[in-house]
Amino acid sequence: MKTVLATFLVLSLFVGCSDDDKGIGGTNEQQEIMNKLATSLHNSTAGMGYFYAKEQGGTELITGIPYSALPCKECHAKPEVSADGCGKCHGLQGDTVLAVDDSKCGDCHGRQGMEVRLGLTDVHRTAGMGCSDCHSAEDTHGDGHVYGSMFQGAIKTGCDQDGCHATIQSSHPSVMHFAGSSFDCSACHVQKTVSCVNCHFESEVNQHKKVPYGAFGDWKFLVKDAQTGKIRTGNIQTVTYNGKASIGVGPFEGHTIYKPSGDWCAECHDNAIVKEYDSAGTMTATWWDAQSKTLNHFKGTIPFPSDWQTALKFDFVTKDTSGNWVYQQTGAEVKHMLFAEPLPNLPPQF
């Protein structure tokens, strides 16, 4: 299965229309799809704009550039049968909309493509499942309602969708509680979280290119879902621009599902970063090595503590005039967490 980005920024996919769907006026079904797409996150990319906006405490606070002025709008899928509409994901033959190839999803949802390139496995992908096996037309074309983010209800997919894991949901030991919170499936069954680290936003603004320091795929973040109250996986977005930095945190569903085995409890309860927090009150997530001139990172599970804004330590880098990565600063001017909360009472005790 070729999976798609499920970021804390925008997570939705296109599924194929039937071969006899013609232009906007071709069928009632086609017209209904176009009406829904007009209000969808695929059309507006409002999910990315929501996290970025200064009103939400986002990266706009360090850039001063409104979302509407960024090249992100180039990813919009217009509600029309054209190369910039349906054809952006489905492909067209004349005015006939073709079934979507899952590989097209990766054009925008890059973290899921990166999961594959980094060699991270997924039980659904291994079983030959595709994006539309889990993501319905409502996830992809929209449901006719306007959402500011996928986390406001735009994505309906869940582990018990279509009864896939309904019996597991009712009998699994996820009913166990930690500090009054139950666990979402992702907390244990997402293997790793892929993060594109330290986006060089000058490149985004000036060259319309996404230039991160790199993609790390051997760590995992845990947060508390603000809506459900369950402990689940999250992710980060770290950005530098003109000598300043920001870090955003939100829920995230990595497409790296596996069945844990062995002493996997130690992933959270007995790892080095939790021990560091227990002894020193800090969690060093990324750090710059001046000798090797590399940005290094902790490999393992990182739970966000209640004092994460001061406890979690991130180093940031930028590019010099020669295009080399160089150390910029430790810590960020902007730190915000949306649709999620830190975990209470860390370090977690058995």
Image (cartoon, rainbow, N blue to C red):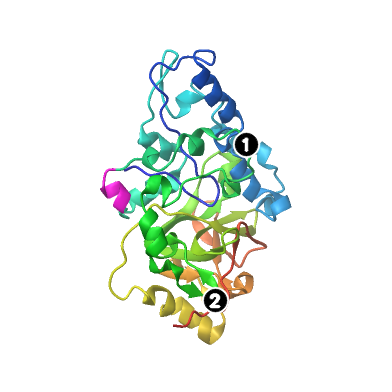
Q: Residue at x 43, y 49 (%)?
A: 111
Q: Amino acid at mark 1?
A: His
Q: Is residue 293 above or below residue 135?
A: below
Q: Residue at x 48, y 70 (%)?
A: 302
How many numbered dots are placed on residues in this image? 2
Q: Which region shows up in magenta?
A: 123-128
Structural distance between the alpha carbons of marks 1 and 2 = 35 Å
Give the image quarter of residue 95: top left
Could you say which disc has been placed on residue 179 in the image?
2
Mark 1 secondary-structure assignment:
loop
Q: Quadrant of the C terminus?
A: bottom left
Q: Quadrant of the N terminus?
A: top left
Q: Earlier in the sequence, mark 1 or mark 2?
A: 1
Q: Is residue 198 above or below residue 312?
A: above
In this view, the residue in front, 231 or 238, is 231
Instruction: Say left or right for 182 vs 47.
Output: left
Q: Which residue is mark 1?
A: 145
In this view, the residue in front, 312 or 40, is 40
Asked if the magenta segment contains residue 285, the reply would be no
Residue 5: x, y in percent?
45, 46
